[in-house]
Image (tube, rainbow, N blue to C red):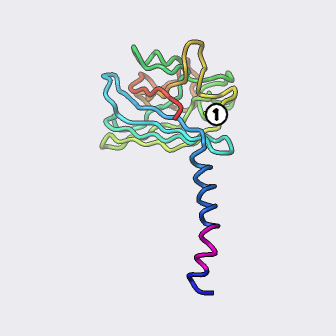
Amino acid sequence: MSIRKLLVALVPALALVALVSATAVGGAPRAGGTFVDANGNTIGWVRLVEDATGVVHVNVKVQGVAPGKHGIHIHGIGACSPTFAAAGPHYNPLGFQHGLLNPLGAHAGDLPNLVVNEDGDGRLNATTVGVTISGGPTTLFDQTPGAVGSAFIIHLNEDDQLTDATNGNSGARIACAVIEAA
């Protein structure tokens, strides 16, 4: 068979694969937000994609944050002002304890620490099954009467992933991003 005949035979099949792939990726529930610091400066973003199995992929990129590890959590109210306290406590619709290492189960909003390099650039690429974008009892949207969505908060200090405190053990809130459906 000539290469031309092979290509003519394969093009319709490849087009169908491309269409199905684009629909699957494009149709996935997505959400995101823009991080601002205490002065209202934009310092980065968060993007969320829920795959077909219900796993939410979390991608964060920030700049201008102090080097080191920082606790990062999903908080229960989609608000960052007038102060970051407006975001409320960690998102915890199922009533678990704080910390990914807690044997009693973690808050739905608990995530691995954000690591920031010496240049102040931080990235987090993680997955979670604690929340959904699409709906259900752990959806990131419509959690509090009168409020829509939730917020990501970056904290000053590292989270030990175990200590159960009202808002974890990561210290002050240094950045916030309201989550909105994409």
> Which x, y percent locates residue 110?
57, 31
Which residues lie in the magenta part? Answer: 6-12
Camera-nearest residue between 103 and 53: 53
The residue lying at 51 percent from left, 29 percent from top is 180
> Which x, y percent locates residue 138?
66, 28
> Which x, y percent locates residue 117?
36, 43
The residue lying at 59 percent from left, 86 percent from top is 2
Camera-nearest residue between 63 and 68: 63
Q: Is residue 149 within the magenta segment?
A: no
Camera-nearest residue between 114 and 159: 114
> Which x, y percent locates residue 98?
60, 26
**Quadrant showing the N terminus:** bottom right
Q: Quadrant of residue 42?
A: top left
Q: Is residue 159 above or below residue 25?
A: above
The residue lying at 40 percent from left, 27 percent from top is 175
Q: Is residue 9 within the magenta segment?
A: yes
How packed mark 1 is, by other alpha carbons closer than 10 Å (few <14, some 14-19, many 20 or more), is some
Camera-nearest residue between 23 and 83: 23
Residue placed furthest toward the bottom: 1
Q: Quadrant of residue 13?
A: bottom right
Dominant secondary structure of the magenta stretch? helix
| Label 1 sits on residue | 134
Q: Quadrant of residue 119?
A: top left
Query: Is residue 109 rendered to the left or right of residue 35?
Result: right
Q: How many marks?
A: 1
Secondary element at tag 1: loop
The residue lying at 51 percent from left, 35 percent from top is 182
Amino acid identity at mark 1? Ser
